[in-house]
Image (cartoon, rainbow, N blue to C red):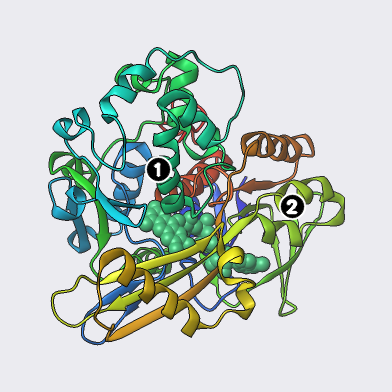
Amino acid sequence: MQKTVAVLGGGIGGLSACYHLSKSPQVSKVVVLEGSERCGGWLSSTRREDGAVFEQGPRGVRPAGAVGKNTLNMVSELGLESEVLPVTYDHVASKNRYLYVGGQLHKMPTSLGGAVQTVPPFSRPLLLSVLKEVLIKRSKEDDESVHAFVSRRLGSELADIAIDSLCRGVFAGDCRTLSVRSCFPPLYNAEKARGSIVLGMVFGSGALPTVTPSDLATRSVKESWAQWSLRRGMQMLPEALEDSFKRKGNVELHRHASVKTLNATGTGWEIKLEDGGTVKADHVISALPANSLASILPPAAQPLSQQLQEISSVTVAVVNLEYEGSVLPVTVMMGGAWFHEVFGDPEGVSKERLLERATQAVTSHLGVTAVPIWSLVALLKDCIPQYHLGHWKRIETMRTYISDHSLPLTLAGASYDGVSVNDVIFSGRTAAEKLVGIVCECECDIAY
Ligand SMILES: Cc1cc2nc3c(=O)[nH]c(=O)nc-3n(C[C@H](O)[C@H](O)[C@H](O)COP(=O)(O)OP(=O)(O)OC[C@H]3O[C@@H](n4cnc5c(N)ncnc54)[C@H](O)[C@@H]3O)c2cc1C
């Protein structure tokens, strides 16, 4: 039977779901409902007339793994190969990674040589912690904070310094409250399968999704790409997806179409929009942030709404700074799990205050005393979901509720199975393919 599917949210997750749905002959129509005036969600690039591009959201995508290949395959199908800007592992930007600890910048080791020496801010060689890890007994817990897990397996110094920074960088979150099982599934799975992160990395820790690589994805491996971006900014990706939908006969994309309520009709959904319009669909793929979905579900689905509300997100201020001459262009990201503590209520903080704080940080951390000649301040409210301890259980409970109540609803997007651009794109694909009954190339339940 042919279906009409409504995709809620035109962020990269919703657009990916639509892209894959629109390929299926079983889907007669895909209706994308995006509340704002533009698609792409957090993928947002400012392009200045002189050609400079400044990102407010994601700026680097990793090519590695099945989800990395999946994104590059889509990039290739959309004809964006010539726009890709790779950063290879031997590029200075990959080799020069610093941690700011105790008021000082410390260069991180990038070679084996560096790992066998004691490199500040660490008090012993990193290789020693890694070798000892193999001997640590596995835990029986079904989840643990990222900090507790890394402290137990690799020592508290690595947890306090390296993992703390990693969690701030990726999730803008606190490693003491984030879940290792949901934020870093490869680490959790390695311990469960092999009793050790190191052994898991060497021998593998169970079936992973497999994706056949396009020529572009193969090139990324051959050329040793660490990350990639797009010439006119990451926003090129949602723009190219939108263009591709115009060439399809079965996609309707509505902007300014904020969803107000979802009402189950017995055979599907009646979707009411804020502007008074109504859309009928046999199935809904929600690629909205969990909280937004919670607020539009019918009262009968209250247990589901309650679980969704428990997935909180943090606010981040992104400040792009441009300096005259050869000073690097600098982006400062501030806040996250500490936003309220540092700045108070996001509604009450001025752009001038954020700019001033960012400029101060660049001076104290990088020693740049020049005054920026141009800046762009963006306050991104509730932009990164936090997978706290027990997140996996919440997701399992929600999906069981949906299936037990035969709700024609699929959850996709950053709130559930990974926050990276790759994870979100893959979640859109998985939602679409599960719905139309395609057994994708995955050999197991998704485990990214
Ligand atoms: C500052 C920042 C930096 C990042 N850096 C990176 C990076 O370098 N690399 C990386 O891989 N990832 C990065 N990420 C993560 C990644 O960008 C996001 O997780 C991803 O873009 C989320 O996509 P999404 O489609 O799930 O959600 P969103 O982008 O939030 O899209 C959801 C959409 O739903 C719409 N919507 C909301 N409510 C309604 C409603 N009621 N009706 C209709 N529409 C509605 C919104 O307007 C939005 O367009 C970064 C994120 C941020 C915020």
Mark 1 nearby-residue class (10 Å; few <14, some 14–19, many ≥20): some
Which quadrant of the structure image shows residue 60?
A: bottom left
What residue sits 58% from the left and 31% below the top?
144
Residue 290: x %, y % from top left: 65, 54
Q: Does dot 1 land on a helix, a strand or a loop?
A: helix
The spot of residue 26 in percent (x, y) is: 54, 46
Question: Which amino acid does the dot numbered 1 rest on?
Answer: Ile
- In the shown orientation, is residue 95 left or right of residue 171? left
The answer to whether residue 380 is seen in the rendering is yes
Number of the front mark, 2 or 1: 1
Q: Is residue 4 left or right of residue 360?
A: right
Q: Is residue 420 visible?
A: no
Which of the image's four quarters has the C terminus? top left
Q: Residue at x 47, y 46 (%)?
A: 429
Q: Residue 338 placed where, x, y %? A: 56, 59
Q: CA distance from mark 2 to mark 1?
A: 50 Å
Q: Which residue is mark 1?
A: 161
Say above or below: 431 vs 85.
above
* Residue 47 versus residue 126 in the image, above or below: below
- Residue type for callout 2: Gly
Q: Which residue, given by chain and number where applicable, does mark 2 sit on?
A: 268
In depth, the one of 367 and 247 nearer the eye is 367
Quadrant in which the N terminus is drawn: top right
Of labels 2 and 1, earlier in sequence is 1
Asked which secondary structure carries label 2, the reply is: loop
Could you say which disc has been placed on residue 63 in the image?
A: none
Label 2 residue near ligand 1, CB within 8 Å: no
Q: Nearer the viewer, residue 104 or 242?
A: 104
